[in-house]
Amino acid sequence: MAFDGKIVLITGGAGGIGRAIGHAFARAGATVVLAGRDVTALADAAKEIGPGTADHVVADVTDAASTARMVETVTGRHGGLHVAVNNAGILGPVGPVADLGAAAWGDVLDVNLTGVFLSMKHEIAHMRAHGGGTIVNVSSNIGAHGRRPGMAAYAASKAGVSVLTRTAALDHIADGVRINAVSPGASDTPMSLLPGESETGRAVRMRGAIPAGRVANTSEVASTVLWLASDASAHVVGHDLVIDGGSTA
């Protein structure tokens, strides 16, 4: 799974999973561009991955003009875009549907679903005009694969990503753009911690909650993304690969 000479864009690139994906692509020879809203966090992540190997661009995936500029900036600086990983996402408030505010609902859908649509729209447009490419969207095992009480907005948004991925894959495989998704379960990031919970406490809780007995390492999610983006999975189109230690088996 070598990516020498490839340009890889990762939205949500400063977060735990996004950063791990960036490290993995860089180790495989790619030039990595991290995108997100927090310029300080992006710069820190790019520096950690390595000067000359990682770049960053400020972008808001909920804004159509910003996503267009994101792709234009990446291709202008680096001469192309071969792989895109649409990873930006938020959990949003947890609570029953009847108590969920319309604004909170909209925020989660805007980032998690519309953000993937807008990013893909501009990524695909460039790729199909320049010989093709691969896209991996980061969905979740909560959504199309499983549900949790109090997580309606998140589940709906991620189920939408799963369906959007499959539809876009059918729309654009003939253009040379191959699109798939990964659906991680609980991973070694702050999002999997309950309020006030330590990593040790989470480990104890997960021994009984996940058949595999633990959360996923971010490197395990990253290696799956690399496989889906590589020629090793060239005949995999429109697939949503679950990485959750058996939680939704």
Image (spheres, helix red, strand yellow):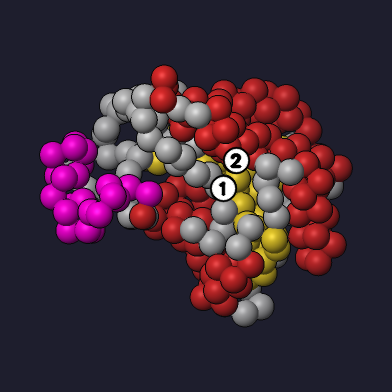
* Residue 85 percent coordinates (x, y): 60, 48
Q: Is residue 92 left or right of residue 171?
A: left
- Alpha-carbon neighbours of circle 1 within 10 Å: few (<14), some, or many (≥20)? many
- The range drawn in magenta is 191-212
| Residue 199 within the segment the image draws in magenta | yes
* Residue 149 percent coordinates (x, y): 32, 25
Q: Quadrant of residue 163?
A: top right
Which quadrant would the C terminus be assigned to in this image?
top left
Q: Is residue 182 left or right of residue 135?
A: left
* Residue bearing mark 1: 88
Q: Quadrant of residue 10?
A: bottom right
* Residue bearing mark 2: 111
Q: Amino acid at mark 1?
A: Ala
Q: Quadrant of residue 76?
A: bottom right
Determine whether label 2 and label 1 are within 8 Å by CB: yes
Disc sitting over residue 223 in the figure: none
